[in-house]
Image: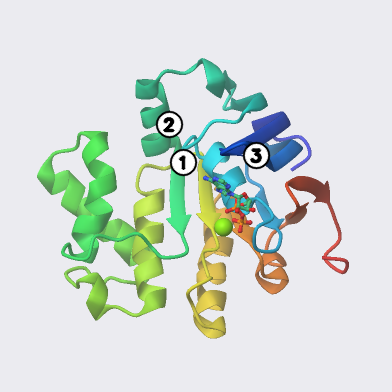
Amino acid sequence: MENSEIILSMKNIVKEYEMGEEVFRALDDVSLEVRKGEFLAVLGPSGSGKSTLMNIIGCLDTPTSGEYILNGEHVADLDERQLAHIRNKEIGFIFQSFHLLQRQTAQENVELALIYANQDGKKMHKRSEELLTKVGLEDKIKSLPNQLSGGQQQRVAIARAIANNPTILLADEPTGALDQKTGAQVMQLFHELNEEGRTIIMITHDSKIASHAGRIVKILDGRISEGELEDA
Ligand SMILES: Nc1ncnc2c1ncn2[C@@H]1O[C@H](COP(=O)(O)OP(=O)(O)O)[C@@H](O)[C@H]1O
Ligand SMILES: [Mg+2]
């Protein structure tokens, strides 16, 4: 792992939110490097800046200052079209609340990600079936989200997230809405994806969930430290 390529590099990232007269610093001088194939957990309590960090990593938001290089590109130099491309192709997002479209089947939800790949319908159906089979949902392809358990819905979201073979899987509290057993199953799936060489960045407040990762960095009051789990 030490020798693999650095795919994400943040240097001295600051994110400030203006609230009327006040300025609130949600990220304070964050520096972070992630290598290809890593499974990294960012562990911190509620309000510590985890989602703010995720939004910047995922190019959903921009830092107030600091340098962010993703796949060799300075993100600050990219225009909106290039950023949209990165969000669609290079990053697979997984959220606590799944973010599935409720009126669309599991298969249609996965295919939303594939529309950008410009595949014809037949190819797209084949690919979405493969993806749903991979996450263990081959018998739920035509199910609507409300016909699925939370764990199954998260699996659909994971199938959608990996659809375009993204460089990074970025998960914000992926087990936050799941019971312990289902959460552990989702972590098993993360392990499998990581063993295939996928880079995973997982954000969590749960040290047990973080312990599944190969490396843990802690975040507190917007500041990051590499750390052992014991003093989390
Ligand atoms: N848009 C915003 N405007 C003002 N303050 C914000 C905004 N988003 C987040 N914050 C504040 O920044 C801090 C970190 O928030 P967040 O990144 O959501 O933390 P976490 O995901 O770890 O719970 C919190 O104190 C939160 O209130
Ligand atoms: Mg959050």
Query: Which residue corresponds to the image point at 24% horizontal and 60% vertical from the top-left?
Result: 101
Q: Which residue is mark 3?
A: 22
Query: Which residue corresponds to the image point at 45% horizontal and 36% vertical from the top-left?
Result: 90
Q: Which residue is mark 1?
A: 91
| Quadrant of picture, ligand 2 | bottom right
* Vertical comparison of 74 with 197: above or below: above
Query: Which residue corresponds to the image point at 41% horizontal and 75% vertical from the top-left?
Result: 151
View extreme (left): residue: 121
Query: Does mark 3's beta carbon lie closer than 8 Å to ligand 1?
Result: no
Position of residue 216 in the picture relative to residue 53 (left or right): right
Does the image show residue 199?
Answer: no
How crowded pointer 2 is (Cα within 10 Å; few <14, some 14-19, many 20+) is rated as many
Q: Nearer the viewer, residue 132 or 45?
A: 45
Dot 3 or dot 1: first in sequence order is 3
The x, y position of residue 108, in whole percent, is: 19, 57
- Amino acid type, callout 3: Glu
Image marks 3 and 1: residues in contact by CB distance under 8 Å:
no
Q: Nearer the viewer, residue 97 or 151?
A: 97
How crowded pointer 3 is (Cα within 10 Å; few <14, some 14-19, many 20+) is rated as few
Q: Indicate the secondary structure of the residue bearing disc 2.
A: helix
Q: CA distance from mark 3 to mark 1?
A: 33 Å
